[in-house]
Amino acid sequence: MAKKRPWYLTKAAWAEAQAADFHQRAQQIPLVPSSNWRAVRGRAREQALYRAQARRFELLAAKLREQTA
């Protein structure tokens, strides 16, 4: 059976959950040997992309909370 999508009370709560998911994905990127500098740079770049997305959703959540307050 298909997994049910989570339901959020507000759009701000949804954005916060998305940000948390992107932070978790950034942490889950596997470690690479330091001797492989290309892999190290690729890992850092991938983490930066996930963290940028997380920051985008955090800003969206703050904006949505501000609008509803």
Image (cartoon, rainbow, N blue to C red):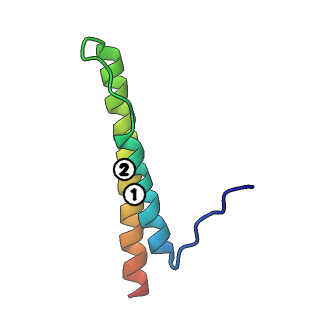
Q: Which residue is mark 2?
A: 23
Task: Give amino acid for label 1.
Answer: Ala
The C terminus lies in which quarter of the figure?
Answer: bottom left
Please tell me how crowded label 1 is: few (under 14), some (14-19), or many (20+) other residues with Cα within 10 Å. some
Circle 1: element type: helix
On the image, the x and y values in percent for residue 54 come to: 39, 53
User: Looking at the rendered structure, which numbered label has been put on residue 3?
Assistant: none
Circle 2: element type: helix
The residue at 24%/17% (across/down) is 34
The residue at 42%/60% (across/down) is 57
Please tell me how crowded label 2 is: few (under 14), some (14-19), or many (20+) other residues with Cα within 10 Å. some
- The correct choice, above or below, for 63 with respect to 34 in the image is below
**Residue farthest left in this picture:** 34
Contact between labelled residues 1 and 2, with CB atoms less than 8 Å apart:
yes
Q: Which residue is mark 1?
A: 20
On the image, the x and y values in percent for residue 29 come to: 39, 34
